[in-house]
């Protein structure tokens, strides 16, 4: 395994990871709904033993997982990654590139199912399918597992969005405000106006590694399609409702496959208690709590990141 280290990180990504990835990358668009193209990337492994589908988090893109894909390929896994609608290079229902909008959270699920059933599974043949999800993508992933229980063999949930945090604002108040604001075309607007891409700092970010944070920030500065940074009112309403749906006991009971759930102790974006409750209700879920960590566990320091991926590889390769 060739690891990318924090020392000269950007140079290693440019000179080592990106050439390796570009040789194996195929990009395209999948249209579940005519006129609403969803961008995806497919990476071919040299001798694949399985296929991993990546479901990214809020305001992210498959590009942010370039280092993760580099490791998955080396470990022998083909990878499919998607830019969820309203993100990256995929279809957007609103005109403001900085604002993520979703009419229905279930659209994320249906998009992921369509891509997996119509492109990923036929290409995979007899290879097992695994899911890797982060944050918002974790909510999408859990809903997908509940809706199509036999599609994936195992799933990793990294800081999954099973409950949203609004800081000092109580959830019922946030839901009521978003619901009122979400009525009609006003629902596509953010709760606070966003007319430019704001300057970001590592100190206020969700990352645990400054070089990794700065690398993706540079990608965003270079590509306006990656500069989503705020939620529409309707996205807020739909996300709250989605968290409630996927954590109902009767829905969780539909998931029969092994799950590996990583929790960041210092997460301020999702509710850790909701993850605890989900893990306790799920039939076969291992909960790994990482002390002192912020939300983006796949953007960790070198040693922590190696341990994170070694745990994931052992989980994918272990018995059911």
Image: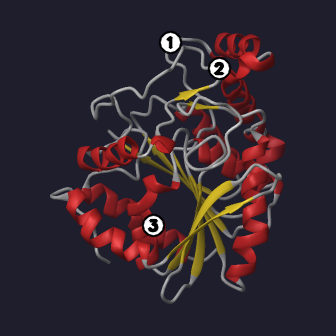
Which of label 1 and label 3 is nearer to you? Answer: 3
Mark-to-mark CA distance, 2 and 3? 33 Å
| Residue in the picture at 29% in, 75% down | 2
Which of label 1 and label 2 is nearer to you? Answer: 2
Q: In which quarter of the image is the C terminus?
A: bottom right
Q: Quadrant location of residue 235?
A: top right
Q: Quadrant location of residue 234?
A: top right
Which of label 2 and label 3 is nearer to you? Answer: 2
Tell me if label 1 and label 2 are in contact, CB under 8 Å. Answer: no
User: Is residue 265 or residue 268 the one in the foreground?
Assistant: 268
Residue at image mark 3: 69
Tell me if label 1 and label 3 are in contact, CB under 8 Å. Answer: no
Residue 168's tag is 1
Query: Residue reaching furthest bottom?
Result: 47
Mark-to-mark CA distance, 1 and 2? 22 Å
**Residue 151 seen by the camera:** no
Relative to 320, 44 lies left or right = left
**Sequence-first tag of 2 and 3:** 3
**Sequence-first tag of 1 and 2:** 1
**Sequence-first tag of 1 and 3:** 3
Relative to 60, 285 lies left or right = right
**Residue 161 seen by the camera:** yes
Q: In which quarter of the image is the N terminus?
A: bottom left
On the image, the x and y values in percent for residue 123 come to 69, 80
Residue 189's tag is 2
On the image, the x and y values in percent for residue 78 come to 55, 76
| Residue in the picture at 69% in, 72% down | 120
| Residue in the picture at 51% in, 35% down | 228
Numbered circles on residues, count:
3
Label 2: how many Cα within 10 Å (few below 14, some 14–19, many 20+)? many
């Amino acid at each position: 395994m060739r690891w990318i280290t924090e020392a000269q990180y950007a140079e290693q990504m440019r000179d080592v990871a990106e050439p390796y990835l570009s040789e194996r990358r195929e990009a395209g668009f999948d249209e579940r709904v005519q006129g609403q193209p969803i961008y995806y990337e497919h990476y071919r492994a040299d001798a694949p033993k399985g296929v991993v589908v990546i479901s990214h988090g809020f305001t992210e893109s498959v590009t942010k997982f370039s280092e993760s894909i580099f490791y998955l390929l080396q470990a022998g896994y083909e990878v499919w990654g998607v830019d969820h609608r309203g993100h990256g290079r995929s279809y957007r229902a609103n005109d403001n590139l900085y604002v993520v909008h979703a009419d229905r959270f279930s659209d994320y699920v249906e998009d992921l199912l369509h891509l997996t059933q119509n492109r990923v599974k036929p290409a995979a043949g007899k290879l097992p399918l695994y899911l890797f999800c982060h944050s918002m993508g974790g909510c999408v992933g859990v809903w997908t597992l509940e809706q199509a229980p036999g599609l994936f063999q195992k799933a990793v949930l990294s800081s999954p969005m099973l409950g949203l945090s609004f800081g000092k604002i109580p959830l019922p108040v946030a839901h009521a405000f978003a619901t009122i604001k979400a009525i009609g075309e006003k629902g596509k607007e953010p709760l606070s106006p966003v007319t430019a891409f704001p300057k970001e700092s590592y100190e206020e970010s969700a990352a645990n590694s400054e070089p990794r944070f700065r690398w993706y920030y540079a990608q965003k500065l270079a590509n306006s399609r990656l500069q989503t940074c705020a939620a529409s009112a309707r996205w807020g309403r739909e996300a709250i409702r989605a968290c409630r749906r996927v954590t109902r006991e009767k829905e969780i009971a539909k998931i029969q496959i092994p799950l590996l759930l990583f929790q960041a102790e210092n997460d301020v974006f999702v509710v850790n208690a909701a993850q605890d409750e989900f893990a306790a209700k799920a039939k076969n879920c291992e909960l790994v709590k990482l002390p002192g960590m912020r939300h983006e566990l796949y953007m960790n320091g070198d040693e922590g990141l190696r341990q994170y991926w070694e745990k994931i590889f052992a989980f994918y390769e272990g018995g059911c």
